[in-house]
């Protein structure tokens, strides 16, 4: 994990340095004198050699001394301030996706080559093909502008850091969470269907049916649990998909989370925030992959860890 994070930090830092524009000019604003711009460059350490700039940025992130340029506070403070909004959005999107996609994929496999199967696979194909921001815009247009039943942007009222605890917050949460869950639903439905079809062709399923075991028990107890391991892997991998989709969804719906913070920081060339966010999201994704690997033994008793 440390090697991956180190390599990622170098890659992101290099990309930031290759971007056009000067953070000092953006921070100084229009009409700033060359002396003011040079003073800001010296204050931010932008006049120093590239390796020294990298070390200053990385060490400043981990000891908490470096601050976000445009927010005038610690990088980690602004990240953890936006974290609850993104966690809330991601969790609700994942719950919606799992509640719909897994039963849909299961039924699609059980009733293979029927209208239900064709409908699920068609909707899954559409969900994978349509960009998240387009889905969000359509939902905003239909539910917010035409029908006027839901707000189109913002987060709404909160209790502490959470908005789902209030009715207004829940209403604001619907459009971004449904939009973000569209891609997750499509991927999980397709994978659940494929995994179930593979398991249903196994000999032990035929044996269970030949013994007279009820079809519901065969499907749920014998087939579904053994088909769950690939789906669980995909759910773990979708943690990074949630954060990537949140960048587009939060920007489109003005949701004040980490995805929108990333876009703001890139536009303002706030290198410390961009690098801190990238490393934080990468670490979260890697931990989620580790948790998924450890959960395999619970899902499939045939797997053991030495």
Image: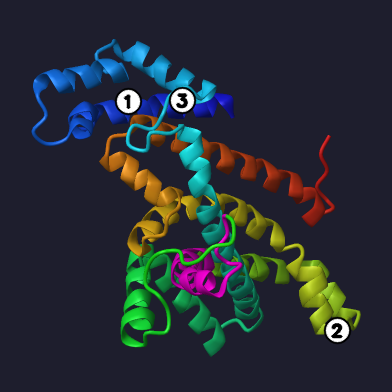
Q: Earlier along the polypeptide chain: callout 3 or callout 1?
A: 3
Q: Secondary structure at mark 2?
A: loop
Residue found 83% across the figure and 78% down from its top: 217
Q: Which mark is residue 191?
A: none
Give the answer, above or below, for where 282 lies relative to 246: above
Q: Secondary structure at mark 3?
A: helix
Q: CA distance from mark 2 to mark 1?
A: 60 Å
Quadrant of image for the N terminus = top right
Q: Which mark is residue 214?
A: 2
Give percent across and percent down for residue 158.
54, 62
Give percent across and percent down for residue 87.
56, 54
Q: Quadrant of residue 138?
A: bottom left
The answer to whether 137 appears left or right of 150 in the picture is left
Q: CA distance from mark 3 to mark 1?
A: 11 Å
Q: Earlier along the polypeptide chain: callout 3 or callout 2?
A: 3
Residue ID for mark 1: 14
Give percent across and percent down for residue 81.
51, 45
Residue found 34% across the figure and 30% down from its top: 271
**How is colour applied across the structure in the image?**
rainbow
Residue ID for mark 3: 7
């Amino acid at each position: 994990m440390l090697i991956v994070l180190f390599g990622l930090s170098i890659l992101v830092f290099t990309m930031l340095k290759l971007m056009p524009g000067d953070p000092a000019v953006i921070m100084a604003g229009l009409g700033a004198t060359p002396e003011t711009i040079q003073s800001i460059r010296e204050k931010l350490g932008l006049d120093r050699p590239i390796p020294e700039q990298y070390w200053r940025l990385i060490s400043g992130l981990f000891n908490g001394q470096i601050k976000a340029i445009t927010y005038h506070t610690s990088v980690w403070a602004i990240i953890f301030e936006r974290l609850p909004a993104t966690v809330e959005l991601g969790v609700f999107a994942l719950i919606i996706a799992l509640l719909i996609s897994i039963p849909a994929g299961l039924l699609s496999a059980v009733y293979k080559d029927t209208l239900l199967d064709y409908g699920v696979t068609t909707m899954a194909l559409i969900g994978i093909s349509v960009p998240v921001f387009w889905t969000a815009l359509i939902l905003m247009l239909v539910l917010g502008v035409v029908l006027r039943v839901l707000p189109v942007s913002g987060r709404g009222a909160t209790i502490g850091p959470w908005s789902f605890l209030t009715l207004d917050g829940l209403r604001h949460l619907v459009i971004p969470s449904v939009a973000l869950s569209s891609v997750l639903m499509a991927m999980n439905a397709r994978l659940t269907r494929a995994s179930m079809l593979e398991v249903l062709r196994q000999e032990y399923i035929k044996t269970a049916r030949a013994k007279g075991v009820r079809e519901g028990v065969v499907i749920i107890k014998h087939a579904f649990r053994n088909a769950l391991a690939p789906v669980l892997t995909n759910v773990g991998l979708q943690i990074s998909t949630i954060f990537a989709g949140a960048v587009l969804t939060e920007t489109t719906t003005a949701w004040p989370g980490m995805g929108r913070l990333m876009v703001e920081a890139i536009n303002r060339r706030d290198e410390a925030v961009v690098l801190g966010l990238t490393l934080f999201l990468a670490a979260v994704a890697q931990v989620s992959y580790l948790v998924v690997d450890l959960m395999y033994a619970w899902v499939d008793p045939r797997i053991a860890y030495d």
